[in-house]
Structure formats: structure tokens, C-alpha cells
Image (cartoon, rainbow, N blue to C red):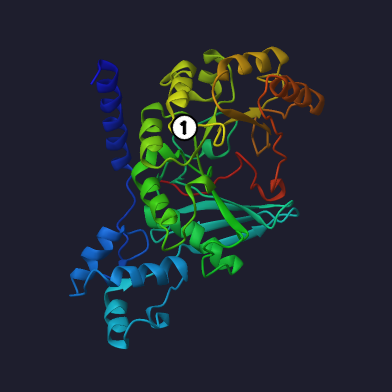
Amino acid sequence: MTHADDLSELERTRIMAKAALFAPPPQVLADGRRELVGLSREEMAAALAEIGEKPFRIKQLWHWIYHQGATDFSAMSSLSRPLQERLAERFVIGRPDTAVVQTSDDDTRKFLFRFRDGQEAETVYIPDRREDRGAVCLSSQVGCTLSCRFCHTGTQRLARNLGAAEIVGQFMAARDSYGEWPSPQGETPRLLSTIVLMGMGEPLYNYENVAKAMRIVMDGEGIALSRRRITLSTSGVVPMMDRAGAELGVGLAVSLHAVTDALRDEIVPLNRKYPIAELLAACRRYPAASNARRITFEYVMLRGVNDSEAEARELVRLIAGIPAKVNLIPFNPWPGSAYLPSKREQLMRFAQIVMDAGFASPIRMPRGQDILAACGQLRTESRR
């Protein structure tokens, strides 16, 4: 192991230690019953062993919880009535409470979910108007620790991390809302066909819970969502990018937003710790990156700040050789924000330079702005 590897491992250890300070509460009700959603297969086996049940029950329960979407043990017809009753005495199959649901004029739907300790996070479903499907934008934390200057979520201090049950529970509750149980397997994808970890929080600062939730989502006997239909977005937690690539192999989106360290230090303060050169080196190492599965670079277009033609050319130079596409995101204003969206003509000139260099450069049209559900607009009133 090289000195650089030693330093990366030390930094990963520090990140995990900090995550523990913001750990979610145990998923246990006041009456002592334990939540089954969010448990790994091994944890579920151990929990069932405590009531004298054999491991083969795991497959049955997993199917009912994650394929059928059952929340009541009495609905599990392949289990005997006495077993249903024993399970109901010891366990629950829950969802986060849906405190508020808002639907935009463009059919984007935003959920405010409330968890057992009263903390809240927002989740957004973004339909694809061209196809009968769409993406669920999941949150990984209550609040955020990064304080990116253009992001509304960044104005809310980190309250705590979300647990695996709370992360996968957002997707399951959204499926409840759209009546999409049982889970499709090998069929045409339904409306909720994609997950993007782009909601509140930095997923790689809550890696253990995010990874556990995504393994549950990808399990072939349950929700069975392909890793190709999951994208994890990060502002550039470099030491954890390598681990996420090796262990999960999901799609990667990188919130870049600037092409110089001086500007990125200002608008994405995490850059002071992991500057652009280190971030792009991690992108080049990311094992899932290929021409078939390109890394997405997200770039919020801020008028007069990062949208010049010179910056477009520097962006092209920086990402040369990386299988990539660039999502250009018009800035979505929020109350108290100090920035303006780039003018349309400037946005188009920027996109053309990137496209002429051989990179796809779609302009992400704002969705859900009227309900503050667009990129960078999520925020709740929860506090630590």
C-alpha cells in the first residue's frame, strides 16, 4: 500500500467517524417492535432466529416486503396465521409518514416525509414526458453539511444522516403513492423506474446507510432495480468515490459547477479539501465509467459567474479523456438566493462549445420550480 493509499484510508476512517456523530436513531418503536425495512438479509435472518424461525423464511419475507410492497403481515398468504401473529408482535414494516404532497404544473411531485423522530426530508418524483417512466430523487441526509452557495439545501445545517430504512422507505412510499406494487421484474419499466441520489445531503458522507439501502433496492428478489438505473451524485468526497465505485458500481454524477479552484472554493466549499485535480483523478479511476456508462458532470449555470465561453473551453480541457456527459442546469432561484440564471443565449453558446468537443451537453429544463422541487431548491425546517 502506498503512502497515498494510507492517507486515503485514514481520510475514509475520519469520514466514517464523523458520520457516526450524525447517526440515525434505531428503527425501534416505543412498544419495542423492530423495523424490518432496511435490514440486510443477514440482519433479518438474525432477527428471525430470535423467535425460532429458520433462514428460509427470509426469502418469503423479502418477497412480500420488497416485491409485493406489503406493510401488514396478515396479507402474507404464504405464511401461517400463527407465524403472521408472531411477526406482528415483534416487528413492523413501515414507511416514513407523508406530511405533505405537492404536484407541480409539470406533474413533478414532491413529498415531505416525516420520520419517527419527527425529522423531515424531501423526495421528488420527476416524470419523463417522452416516455412512461421517471426518476425518484432521494435524500440521504436531513439537511446538508456542504453549504454550496447556490443550493437552498445548503442553507439548512445538517441535522442527521438518514438510515437505510429511511432511504429505501422514500422509494417505497413513492411507489405506494403511484400504486406500483408488485415490483416489475423483466417487464417494461413503470413510472418509478430510476433512482437518483440527488436530494438533500451528500450521499458519500452517509455512505454506509446509502450503500445498504441501494443493495436492498438492487436485490433481484425484491425491488430489483438495476445498478444502471441508479445514479449517485456527489460534490466530490474523493476518498469515498473509490469505495462507492468498487462496492456499488452505480452511475456517478459529479457536482462540478466551476473550472478553477478559486471559484469552486467559493461556491462549492468542499473543493478546499478535495480540489478539482483530485476530484477528476477520482473520476478517471471510477470503475463503472465507460462509453456505455458515462460519468455525468453537473454544472449549474450562474449568470456572470461561471458561464463564459472561456470557462466552457476549460471545462472541455479538464474532462478530456473521461467517458462523460455534461448536464447544464439553469440556476433555480430560491428565497434569498444571490444568483441569477444564465441568459438563454449564453447557455446555448456554452453548450455548443462542449458539444463541439464531443461531449453530450443537454440543458436540463427546470422541473417543479413552482413547488420548490427543482434542482437545488429542497429544504425542510428540521434542526439537529
Q: Nearer the viewer, residue 244 or 293?
A: 293
Q: Would you place residue 77 above or below residue 252 in this image? A: below
Residue 30 seen in the figure: no
Residue 153: image quadrant is top right
Query: Is 98 left or right of 349, judged from the image as shown?
Result: left
Q: Is residue 349 visible?
A: yes
- Using the image, determine if residue 123 lies above or below residue 292: below
Q: Position of residue 86 (x, y in %)?
A: 26, 80
Nearer-the-camera pick, 240 or 356: 356
Dividing the image into 4 quarters, which one contains the N terminus?
top left
Q: Amino acid at mark 1?
A: Leu
* Residue at (55, 26) in percent of width and height: 256
Q: Secondary structure at mark 1?
A: loop
Residue 172 image point, x, y percent? 49, 62
Task: In the displayed orientation, state which residue is furthest to the bottom.
Answer: 81
Write the residue at 39% across / 37% down.
244
Q: Quadrant of residue 79?
A: bottom left
- Numbered-mark total: 1
Seen in the image, is 57 located left or right of residue 139? left
- Which residue is at 82% across, 25% downward? 345
Q: Note whether 213 is above or below 334 in the view shown.
A: below
Q: In this rendered view, identify the residue nearer to me: 263 or 213.
A: 213
Give x and y (percent) for residue 217: 44, 55
10 Å crowding of disc 1: few (<14), some (14-19), many (20+) = many
Residue where numbered disc 1 is placed: 146
The residue positioned 58% from the left and 35% from the top of the image is 151
- Give the x, y percent position of residue 245: 41, 35
